[in-house]
Image: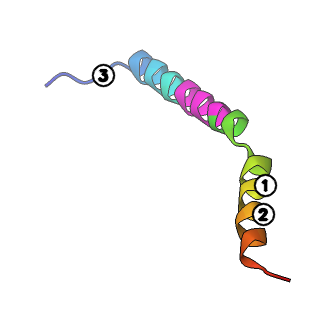
Amino acid sequence: MPQMAPMSWLYLFIYFILMFLTFNSINYYLYLPMLKMKFNYKIISNYWKW
């Protein structure tokens, strides 16, 4: 079984770092905390009968 050359390890490392950063940035910009807070507020406000 042949071993990988150091240059291939570098390309593989750069590829995984780029995929990691891309995945994290997509998750960061898709997260909408205000939408979830409004939704939870409506559920809680329906329970309380003042």
**Residue 14, x across and y down, in percent:** 53, 23
Quick check: is 19 in the magenta stretch?
yes
Q: Residues within 10 Å of mark 2 (few under 14, many from 20)?
A: few
Q: In this figure, which residue is indicated by the disc labeled 3?
A: 4
The residue range painted magenta reads: 17-26
Q: Pointers 1 and 2 in contact (CB under 8 A)?
A: yes
Q: Which amino acid does label 2 sit on?
A: Tyr
Q: Which amino acid does label 1 sit on?
A: Lys
Dot label at residue 38: 1
Q: Which of marks 1 and 3 is in front?
A: 1
What is the quadrant of residue 20 in the picture? top right
Image quarter hosting the C terminus: bottom right
**Residue 13, x across and y down, in percent:** 49, 27
Q: In this figure, which residue is indicated by the disc labeled 2?
A: 41
Q: Is mark 3 on a helix, strand or loop?
A: loop
Quick check: is 45 in the magenta stretch?
no
**Residue 34, x across and y down, in percent:** 80, 49
What is the quadrant of residue 22 in the picture? top right
Q: Residue at horizontal 75%, vertical 61%?
A: 42
Q: Residue at horizontal 74%, vertical 70%?
A: 46
Q: Is mark 1 on a helix, strand or loop?
A: helix
Query: Is most of the magenta stretch helix, strand or loop?
Result: helix
Q: Residue at horizontal 57%, vertical 32%?
A: 23
Q: Nearer the viewer, residue 46 or 30?
A: 46
Q: Residue at horizontal 35%, vertical 18%?
A: 5
39 shown above or below 21 = below
Q: Residue furthest front?
A: 49
What is the quadrant of residue 30 in the picture? top right
Q: Residues within 10 Å of mark 1 (few under 14, many from 20)?
A: few
